[in-house]
Amino acid sequence: MSDRMLPEEFADLEPFAARWCIATEAGRYAERLNSTMAELEAFYGAAHPRVGAAMAYLDGFELSDLPEPQLNLLHLVYSLIMVSLPVEVWHQPRVIDSGTAYFDRYLEPVP
């Protein structure tokens, strides 16, 4: 029995899986806000170069019937999207000049 969360082809991203394979947008957003820039940059640095391969790999599966490792990989990609602006543009986990503002999304896309 393997303790891996991701497909074997993406074993290099396994150190980030337990933290970033988050099923909901609200959960991913909360994790981003609770992370330091060093943590976000480490995740981004490892995952960003692999996103093309991950998307090509996931294209081989039916979105409505993803096995758990592949679904975890999709959630990891979603988390990468969530951290991309803080790493690439804002250089902080929160939206610049947003203060204590927040929004709640009641519906979100799901596979």
Image (cartoon, helix red, strand yellow):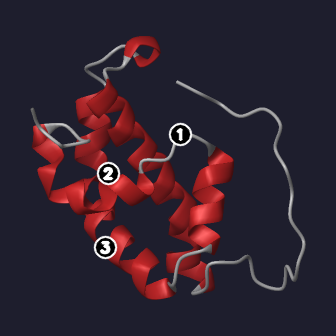
- Crowding around mark 1 (Cα neighbors within 10 Å: few <14, some 14 to 19, many 20+) is some
- Identify the residue position indicated by label 2 in the image: 51
Q: Earlier in the sequence, mark 1 or mark 2?
A: 1
Name the amino acid, label 3: Gly
Residue drawn at (11%, 37%), measured in percent from left and top? 2
Count of labels in the image: 3
Does 108 appear above or below 45?
above
The reply to whether the C-beta atoms of the residues labelled 1 and 2 are less than 8 Å apart is no
Residue drawn at (25%, 20%), measured in percent from left and top?
60
Q: Helix or strand or loop: what does disc 3 sit on?
A: helix
Compared with 41, 65 (above or below) is: above
Q: Is residue 103 above or below residue 110?
A: below
For residue 65, side relative to residue 54 (left or right): right
The residue at which mark 1 appears reads as 23
C-alpha distance separating marks 2 and 3: 11 Å
First in sequence: mark 2 or mark 3? 3
Residue 45 got which mark? 3
CB under 8 Å between callouts 2 and 3? no
Task: State the residue at coordinates (50%, 47%).
Answer: 22
Q: Name the foreground residue: 101 vs 89.
A: 101
Distance in Å between CA atoms under marks 3 and 1? 21 Å
Determine which of the numbered discs, if any, sits on residue 86 in the image. none
Image quadrant containing the N terminus: top left
Q: Identify which amino acid the numbered label 1 is placed on.
A: Ala
Work out whether residue 13 or residue 4 is closer to the camera in this orientation and state it.
4
Point 23% across, 32% down: residue: 57
Category of crowding for the residue at label 2, using alpha-carbon neighbours closer than 10 angstroms: few (below 14), some (14–19), many (at least 20): some
> In the figure, 3 relative to 36: above or below?
above
Q: What element carries label 2?
A: helix
